[in-house]
Image (spheres, coloured by chain):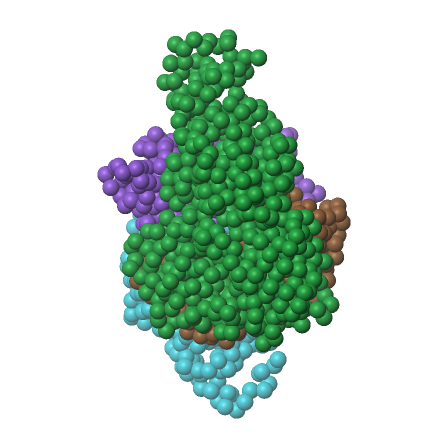
Amino acid sequence: MTTKIRRLAATLSLSTGIAALCAPAMAQDLGEPVPQLQIAYYAADMGPMYEQSARVLSEEWAKLGLSFQMQPVQFSSFISNIMVGGGLEDMAVFTVGADPDRVDPTYWLHDLGACGARRNGAKWCDEAYTEMVKKQRELVKQDERLQLVHEAQKYFHDVAPWWPATNTVYGILWNSDKWDNVTSPAPVAAHEGLVDPWLSAKPKTDDRILDWAHYEDVTTYNPMAEEGAVGWVRFIFDTFAKNNSKGETVPWAAAAWEFTDPQTVKVTLREGMKFHDGEAVTADDAVFTINTVVELQPPAMSSRIANLAGAEKVDDLTFNVKLKAPDASFITTVLTYLFILPEHHWANYDGDKVARDVVADGAVIGSGPFKFKSWRVNETHELETFAEHFHAAEYDGVRRLALGQADAIRSAMLSGTGDIASMVLPVAAMSDLAAQNDHLDFLEIPSHGSMLVWLNNQKAPFTDPAFRKALRVATAKQRAAIEGWLGFAVPAGEGPVPVQLGMWHNSELPEVPFDVDAARKILEDAGYGWDGQGRLHFPKK
Amino acid sequence: MAPARTRSPALARDLARLDERLSAKPAAHLKVNGLSIGYSTLRGRFHAVEDVSFEVRAGTNLGLVGESGCGKSTVVKALMGLLPEFTGISGEALLDGQNILGLSDAQLEPIRWNRISLITQSAMNSLDPVYCIGDQICEAILAHEKVGKAVAWARAEEMFALVGLPAERLYEFPHQFSGGMRQRAVIAMALALNAGMLLADEPTTALDPIMQSQIMSRIRGIHEHMRRSMILVTHDIAVVAETCEAVVVMYAGKVAESGPTADVLERPLHPYTMGLQNAFPRLPVRGQPRQPLISIPGTVPNLLLPPSGCRFASRCPFATDLCRTTAPQLHTVGAQSAACHYTERADEFRAAAARPETWRNMRVGA
Amino acid sequence: MRAYILRRLAQSVLVVWAVTTIMFFMFRVMPADPTAILLERGLTDEARQALLEQWGLTGSMWDQYLAYLGNLIQGDFGSSFFYRKPVWEVLWPLIVNTLWIAIPGLLLGAAIGAAIGTAVGWARRGGKLERSGIFLATVIRGVPNFVIGIALLTIFSSTLGWFPGFGMGDPGATTGFARYFTLDFLHHLALPLIAVIIYFMPENLLLMRSGVVENRTEDYIELVRAKGVPQRRVAWHAARNSMLPLITWLFPALAETIAGIVVIEIVFSWPGVGRELVLAVTRQDYPLAQAAFFLLAVMIVLANLAADLVYGKLDPRVVYK
Amino acid sequence: MTQVPDQGAIRGRSLFSSARDSFRLLMEDNFAVVGVAILAIFVLLAIIGPWLAPYEPFKAMMTETGRLNRLSPPNATHLLGTTAFGNDVLSQFLHGFRVALIVGLVAALAVGFISTVFGVLSGYFGGYVDDVLMRLTDIALSIPTLPFAIVAVALLGPSIENIILVITILFWRNGARIIRSAVLTERERIYVKWARAAGASHFHIIMRHILPNIVRIVFLWVTMSVAFAILTEASLSFLGLGDPTVVSWGQMLNTAFSSGNLRTAWWWVVPPSLALVLLVSSLYLIGRAYEEQTNPRLRRR
């Protein structure tokens, strides 16, 4: 395939090459040729979109006189070697998911871009920028923070160490003969939501159990250890707050919260909540939970609780959360994530609480809108509606079917066994099914999940801002969205923060339209040139 | 493990009835007329057996003699209906007047073993290795007689006693038997239904000489005891002399000579018979010098391209041009008949054939 | 006999140890990182270290290996990284599910294959039955098992709608052991079972046919024919003797086929060991994948041992030394 | 058997002539002729297929309105329709021939070579070498193939070279055993002993006596290995462990499977399935004929 792209590049550059021959730039005016560049992307086990997108993007970049080596990398190796391990060779085209904690700009600005940040795989380091993005996190006054966030985006956009290409569109497919009011959890992917569409759905028939045609199993019902099916476990264990589809953080188990100082948040619980075993939920339970996770530091929770210092009770419904450092993102990312364990089921447990097998112990007890009913490994999970919950569903229960593959999910949706599907089945297939079948409806969820173009900012030619900008201008976002993602992605906006984050995104950044000729012009102006074969050469030293 | 001693009265009664029924079977009469057997192969069609006729009178033994590859066993297989289905068979074989050639397996079912049974050539391979001997004998009995397994087993014990094997060895598997014992087991099996006609296809070939004579004397003993008809296929002319009333000598798929054993051995008409006699050690006849062993030089001709004349011509020390061009007819001399152009010169040939030089000096393959 | 079995058992233990060792080191040199998913979600360095320690992934490879072997000898397969509980608890119900399609599928496949194979082997050489039998069996043998699955699903589930298209039971059906005896379960079982049968049958058929063809010209078959027993009985003798080589092939093939059922489980979304093994590999869940692999290796070794013993039962000539 | 064999018997046969004999015998089997004919067509398509392909296999087809031409049933411009990703099925299908044949042939040659070397060394020299090699195959035979391939490919990374490597590692063991037992029989033959007595070198005996006589078994095994290799590659690709940079039939099916179109887009599913079945079946037909050759008891009389 490498050769194929090279060949393509050669034929394409033939025409431009002839022009280049006539151009004044002669071979002796040029420096070394730009070497072949490696593009890493998620291997096909993550779906064919990455492969397809990387191919489309590199096709356009090849028109700048570059050649590429396609390097599929398995997801886990990609994360540990490239994203965290600093092993990026030249370029990478990959996505970051629409996780709920990423509705806060800190992830995009700081985690992916600051000096020394663990996920700064593009290896760009700028002290001034790092200062800015660290500072914004500490500004608990929203308007101050917003201004700094916008400023940082401007700075980043001018330097262009990396840029997004597309934003992913997710989808929900559901049986509209049987269910009503299935709502969109945008910008978060549907599998992480809770209110939308799950709790809002209303049954139209006597079948009052919502069957979710899902891909894989839940690993454990111990919320301190679960990391894949976080949203599912939050069906059982209430969080303090929720993010809604408008991007706001709204009360859930907590009725209210406020920063009493930059490192203290006072939280007031909702009145009258009960655990599934009938005991009342009190501030003691919340304080116990927070102090337990701070003490145990469960690895699965580490990213969210790193800044937690502890909690103390104020009265039966009120407690203070102490932070290690001021953190404005605490509300959007931690309050919406932390759960409440019943102290009476956990305080006297002597074993390793993080590793506790709660199913075997009969301790899957929370205060959430659903009660645990059964689990058949790699087959089904069944939860019952907890009628006493303040936001109880209007149906009797929810089942998660671990079907393992798109084809079975499709079959389940067609046969009526599945009521709702939200992943694995490609969005395009969902949309097709809804168009072809009267009983199925489809909902698009534009998300903040982004496909990013990463460059190794410590290596030539990417150390040259002109080269980076030329590549950015030649990034075929539209093609990637249509051909790579089958139209179920949208060309990304400018800057590191996705448009889907609403107010956090700086909409005043200058737009960079796709234009290969303009890109060539940028390179030419910076002293780059092309040889007889149309191959790009560095400027002469 | 000694059921013979513990037979219940009912079993004993049933067994007695079965024995009675079987021993009432008469010996069979077999007449074979113009039997020809041909195969078609990739390289053409050939006749393994051509125009063979003979008769076995009820209660007598017929010896079928010849070198290996001359079609003896093929005749036996044809009579049992065991030749492959694509074999071309013509002629008839009348068993008590009924033609048994060309019948289907289903039609043969009531005839096989019931009226005509077989002692096979190599007992080594002719017993199913995964069943015990008793089961294999019982299988034959149960296929033809409506008796219980116990009765069949008891009958098998009787047969084993007849061939001199202890009854408890019925429980053993073929590989636990020695060659001679296996051969006796096969004989016991062949006798199980007291068929009127017994085909013994080289029953002793695979055995050592001592065992050979033991088995043969047992066959003779049984024959005298039960008075069945029998065709004994062998290449050992001495065995025929001791056992059979009549003999058919075959060469290259054709009958060379036939007649009463005494006549044929005393006064062979065909040079092949003479050669055959020379090739086997004989007990010295009183008053005559000890005969040297002389083998017939050369080999049986390729039947795919049979010689146009007498098939024995290439190995015959007395062959003439006539022999090499024209196939001889059967000439009858008394009770004997022989396929030789020069039956009238038989006396002269016999004298010459007794001298080793006669055979040694001929040009083989001329 | 006992000495023989003991010696074979000792050999088997050695082989299993070798396979286990190979697998252990294969997983350890994998460049992939089992903590990757957590890393992507922002796992801190300390937490990662704690996790690696908890999973027994720190220390030298040699120490890890010794610890693993030590635990294995005590019957402890370790804990699944993914499920956070003992591997055995995860695998046990899945093994039962796999056996439900494997054992009946293989037995039926072998029996049907052997029966048809005998008929084809006994048929006239060069005749219609023989030729079409061989041809069809050879062609069916060439159908990859996932194509069998796809075809069955497309025809009988999607088009005709006779059978459900996935899984082991309707959601909300009977739970517990009783579920295996419900109509719903049998309904779901049908297609994957048929797929296993079709997948497994042709080789049995061809082997049996070869055996019968080889045996039908043997002298003892001639003698059985001469005895005037019914033709079916004669064919049985040939079949009975052809079973011997079939058995030596069948048992190892059985284990191998259980391994091949992986694909069928995935196509039919059958919650079995095979599907879990593939998932465990993609999730870098070493303990689970290693345990599943270990079980398969043990199965193959035991199957070989069983083949030896059954062979001895079927063939009186065999003497164990 | 007391005759002294003539010079020819000591000299033995050339590998080439016995291979030719074996092929001639093969062509006497009708089924094998069918297999060879299908195989020949496949080889031809593998050579010219990529040129016949009307489009680049991964090129996205657009409709006039600028939308992706997804899942279009067969029509005049796309004879076999398009995939869910707007790729031309015919073009992908045609590229698949080369991949299948390359995987099959390279893997089979490697397997054939290794199993022959091991089998011959083990069978011919026996003793210590034999013991060690046979214990090795004992272990190798206890490794379940597909699961091992899944793990190994996940470990090495999904590329066509690695898949071929894994297939070679997996299948040499059976071949080595079969060839070893054939060599054991050949070694005891009278003409080998005579050749030895006449002072022939081990190399000469192996090349002129042993190999020419086991060449059918080697052919049988190589033929079967081609089939196994193609099936294994297809299974791995179907499970999503194939090389993402090439188009193989297993991969096409995997894409159809993972995009949930397996049971509806027949124009996308049927061609690769059918091609796999035809190819593997034709190899089995040839293999069966070799089997009858190597086993005289199966030959028709």
- Spot the green chain and give its letter: A
Nearer to the camera, D166 or C223: D166
Image-based side of A432 in relation to A530, left or right: left
Rendering quarter of residue B59:
bottom left
Q: Position of residue A140 (x, y in %)?
A: 60, 48
Nearer to the camera, D106 or C173: C173
Residue shown at 54% from the left, 45% from the top? A143
Chain D: drawing colour: purple
Relative to residue B301, is residue A289 depicted above or below? Answer: below
- Please indicate, yes or no, whether residue D259 appears anywhere in the rendered image: yes
Rendering quarter of residue C73:
bottom right
Quarter containing the C terminus of chain A: top right
Nearer to the camera, A488 or A359: A488
- Spot the cyan chain and give its letter: B
Q: Position of residue A489 (x, y in %)?
A: 41, 43
Rendering quarter of residue D85:
top left
Residue shown at 52% from the left, 48% from the top? A103
- Please indicate, yes or no, whether residue C227 appears anywhere in the rendered image: no
Q: Position of residue B117 (x, y in %)?
A: 42, 69
Quarter containing the N terminus of chain A: top left
Residue shown at 37% from the left, 65% from the top? A179
Relative to residue D167, is residue C292 depicted above or below? Answer: below
Relative to residue A123, is residue C1 depicted above or below? Answer: below
Residue at the extreme left:
D76
Residue at the extreme bottom:
B9
Relative to residue A230, is residue C57 depicted above or below? Answer: above
Q: Position of residue A73 (x, y in %)?
A: 54, 39
Residue shown at 68% from the left, 48% from the top? A325
Nearer to the camera, B98 or C309: C309
Chain C: drawing colour: brown
Query: Count the marks: how many?
Result: 0
